[in-house]
Image: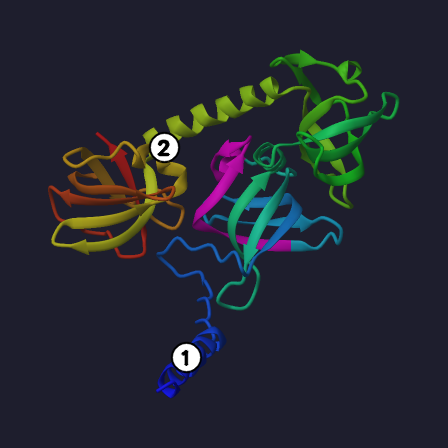
């Protein structure tokens, strides 16, 4: 009579062993897919570089990779995050020469040319809550020796960084113009820098001696982008187009618009070309469904007329009425 419990225990133990040894299903590998907002974080390269050229019509350009001076091509994906002055921006905001991180992915032809963000130095340091802590100053050479670390210095990213300045460098304190001599050892700075065409040089366009000065630039960028989205429309992919009903995924840069959409709200839609500029006059419609999916807006619109030109996987623009 004691055999049965022992046998049951043995079977249970075996089942538990097999379950533990079972191989978990492989995590699907993300791939960039036309018409979908996908960022393959398991297959990307984040490269510090200096912007060399930019074509706003084709949304393509080149940058010089710091350290090797290799010139790299990039193709800006429609949903790429363009992070300028610690906020969202657009391609025309980036000055030639600016130092930034370019997030690159492998394109269909095997080349690493697809780009899903440009993040300038201001955005990177603000987002990571990091500063340049001044170790020494050299007014004659116009240089600062600094350590890059987070706000409480529990994380040191790099020591011995040289920040260079020249006659074009502007300094800011309390949001007002300052000067090099206002910088003291121990100060916590943030900067907007550019390259000089070779090597790893951080030449300052702007030096922010406090948070208030960076926030002033950030607020100006936010206001500019908000005005731009209101005028040009929030961009997004067309997910479906059936019988004058269009489904869209609005990109992160238009999240302010996405969050304001409610059922019954009047909007306008227009199809766009590769440059994300409208190719025809906007068509009026009514929102029939709206929700946020993370920072993306999912919206359905019933158009008043025919939904011509709204090809699935293409980019459209949406305006609030």
Say whether residue 239 is left or right of residue 142: left
For image coordinates 63% across by 55% down, the residue present is 72
Between 246 and 26, the one lying in front of the other is: 26
For image coordinates 38% across by 59% down, the residue present is 34
Say whether residue 223 is left or right of residue 199: left
For residue 194, what is the image quadrant?
Answer: top right
For residue 290, what is the image quadrant?
Answer: top left
- Residue 137 vertical placement versus 55 (above, below): above
> Residue 229, which numbered label?
2
Residue 225 placement (x, y as % from top left) = 43, 30
Between 47 and 2, the one lying in front of the other is: 2
Q: Main secondary structure of the magenta part?
A: strand
- Sooner in the amino-acid sequence: mark 1 or mark 2: 1
Residue 273 placement (x, y as % from top left) = 35, 49
Q: Are marks 1 and 2 in contact (CB under 8 Å)?
A: no
Range covered by the magenta-colored residues: 72-93
Residue at disc 1, secondary structure: helix
Residue position for label 1 = 9
For image coordinates 17% across by 33% down, the residue present is 266
For residue 241, what is the image quadrant?
Answer: bottom left
Which is closer to the viewer, label 1 or label 2? 1
């Amino acid at each position: 009579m004691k055999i049965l419990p022992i046998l049951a225990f043995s079977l249970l133990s075996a089942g538990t062993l097999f379950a533990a040894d079972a191989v978990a299903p492989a995590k699907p590998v993300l791939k960039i897919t036309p018409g979908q907002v996908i960022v393959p974080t398991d297959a990307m390269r984040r490269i510090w570089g200096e912007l060399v050229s930019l074509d706003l019509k084709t949304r393509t350009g080149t940058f010089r990779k710091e350290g090797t001076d290799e010139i790299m091509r990039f193709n800006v994906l429609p949903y790429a995050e363009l992070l300028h002055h610690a906020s969202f921006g657009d391609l025309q905001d980036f000055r030639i020469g600016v130092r930034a991180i370019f997030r690159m992915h492998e394109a269909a032809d095997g080349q690493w040319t697809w780009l899903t963000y440009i993040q300038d130095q201001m955005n990177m340091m603000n987002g990571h809550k990091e500063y340049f802590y001044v170790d020494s100053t050299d007014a004659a050479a116009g240089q600062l020796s600094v350590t890059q670390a987070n706000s409480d210095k529990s994380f040191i990213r790099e020591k011995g960084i040289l920040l260079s300045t020249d006659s074009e460098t502007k300094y800011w304190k309390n949001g007002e113009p300052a000067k090099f001599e206002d910088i003291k050892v121990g100060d916590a700075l943030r900067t907007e820098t550019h390259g000089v065409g070779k090597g790893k040089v951080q030449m300052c366009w702007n030096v922010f001696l406090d948070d208030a000065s960076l926030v002033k630039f950030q607020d100006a960028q936010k206001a500019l982008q908000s005005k731009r989205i209101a005028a040009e429309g929030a961009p997004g992919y067309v997910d479906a187009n059936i019988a004058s009903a269009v489904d869209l995924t609005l990109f992160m840069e238009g999240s302010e618009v996405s969050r304001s959409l409610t059922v019954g709200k009047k909007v306008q839609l227009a199809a766009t070309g590769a440059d994300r500029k409208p190719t025809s006059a906007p068509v009026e419609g009514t929102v029939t469904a709206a929700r946020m999916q993370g920072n993306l807006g999912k919206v359905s619109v019933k158009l008043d007329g025919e939904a011509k030109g709204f090809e699935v996987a293409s980019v459209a623009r949406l305006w609030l009425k």
